[in-house]
Image (spheres, rainbow, N blue to C red):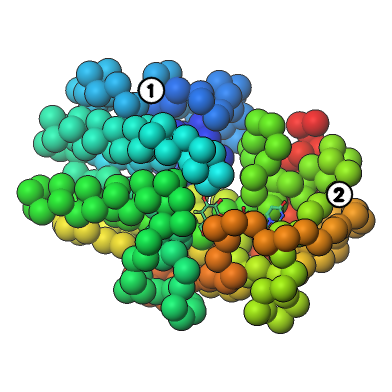
Amino acid sequence: MKILVTGGLGFIGSHTVVELLQNNFDVCIIDNLANSKMSTVDNITAITNKKPKVYCFDVCDSAKTKEVFSTERPDAVIHFAGLKAVGESCEKPLLYYHVNIDATLSVLNAMDSVPTCKSIIFASSATVYGVPNSLPLTETSPIQDATSPYGETKIINERILQDWAKVNPQKSAIILRYFNPIGAHPSGLLGEDPNGVPNNLMPYVTRVATKQAPYLKINGNDYDTLDGTAIRDYIHVVDLARGHVLALNKLKDFRGVYICNLGSGKGTSVLELINAYKKATGVDFKVEFGPKRAGDVPANFASIDKAKRELGFECKYTLEDACKHAYMYQLKHI
Ligand code: UFG
């Protein structure tokens, strides 16, 4: 089975490509290197002994995308390519609407031109649940107003897929809602190394632990949670990647729209994550409390019952594993 992966050199994309290759899928990649590096292909090859073909262009270019689909004739697509910085999306909303929506339209148009390309897996996000009314979040929890243009693009893309699936009853749209992916490949060859100041907690913690930043600022310690810091559901990126392989295998004959959460199913506070990181790596670092970050939800975590029951999903790695792997990757890439 051949899988075309858009954004296949990014953080989640590259880990997913490795899992696909290790499970004997053929893989080709479209990536414009906007937030990734070409050298990632060598690292994928070092882990798997297989070299996926990479087409280097912006998937928003629908003519080129169609051309690649007609050459490669993939059986399924995993669509990761897009912009993902919540803060940046508030400053540049038009850019986010343009890139994140045009990319999906381009991929779906290209799929329409290849009848044998039956499924798309779309990288959605827990952000579509907005400020939760109750926890854990299940796939039937209501979609709420997004707290950022980035989140809004995920909601719009989910709607586009629903409408597309209605007129393509012979195809399937698999929407995976990711919670907070963290960690790195245990080989130390793949990981997350954002350009500039990291927005997310784990890469920031890792910068502080490797002395590239002086201290970690915790955004708010007056939430209504056990220790006052915000709660999220952190999932090791390799476990998240494995979820895609399970979805492809289990949903081969599925037609229509399938929605599934991918998380660990556990809520972890910022302070708990910091303590786990210090314990897993043996590194101590300075922490300060600051005000809440605008747009943050106090707590969210997933119910992963559906993923367990229907996909056979389970997490192999612990929070401490994820911390150790993120640290090891960063040490190699300073
Ligand atoms: N945080 C800090 N200090 C930092 C960075 C983050 O205290 O330096 C806090 C945040 O304020 C938040 C928690 O750590 O309370 C987690 O923040 P992240 O930025 O790591 O993750 P978010 O939950 O805000 O967002 C992530 C992804 C989004 C996705 C969302 C889905 O970045 O793309 O999860 O829930 F939409």
On screen, residue 277 versus residue 297, left or right, reads right
- Dot 1 beta carbon under 8 Å from ligand 1: no
Task: Name the quadrant where ligand 1 sits.
Answer: bottom right
| 64 displayed left or right of 28 | left
Q: Is the residue marked by circle 1 packed among few (<14), some (14-19), or many (20+) residues within 10 Å?
A: many
Measured as percent of width and height from the top left, residue 175 is found at 32, 55
The disc placed on residue 200 is: none
Q: Which quarter of the figure is the C terminus placed in? A: top right
Q: Amino acid at mark 1?
A: Asp
Ligand 1 within 8 Å, label 2 CB: no
Q: Residue at x 36, y 46 (%)?
A: 153
Q: Is residue 71 visible?
A: no
Q: Secondary structure at mark 1?
A: loop
Instruction: State if disc 1 and disc 2 touch (CB < 8 Å).
Output: no
Q: Is residue 169 above or below residue 292?
A: above
Q: Quadrant of the N terminus?
A: top left
Residue denoted by label 1: 58
Whole-angstrom CA distance, mark 2 to mark 1, is 36 Å
Which residue position holds label 2? 215
What kind of element bears circle 2? loop
User: Does residue 44 show up?
Assistant: yes
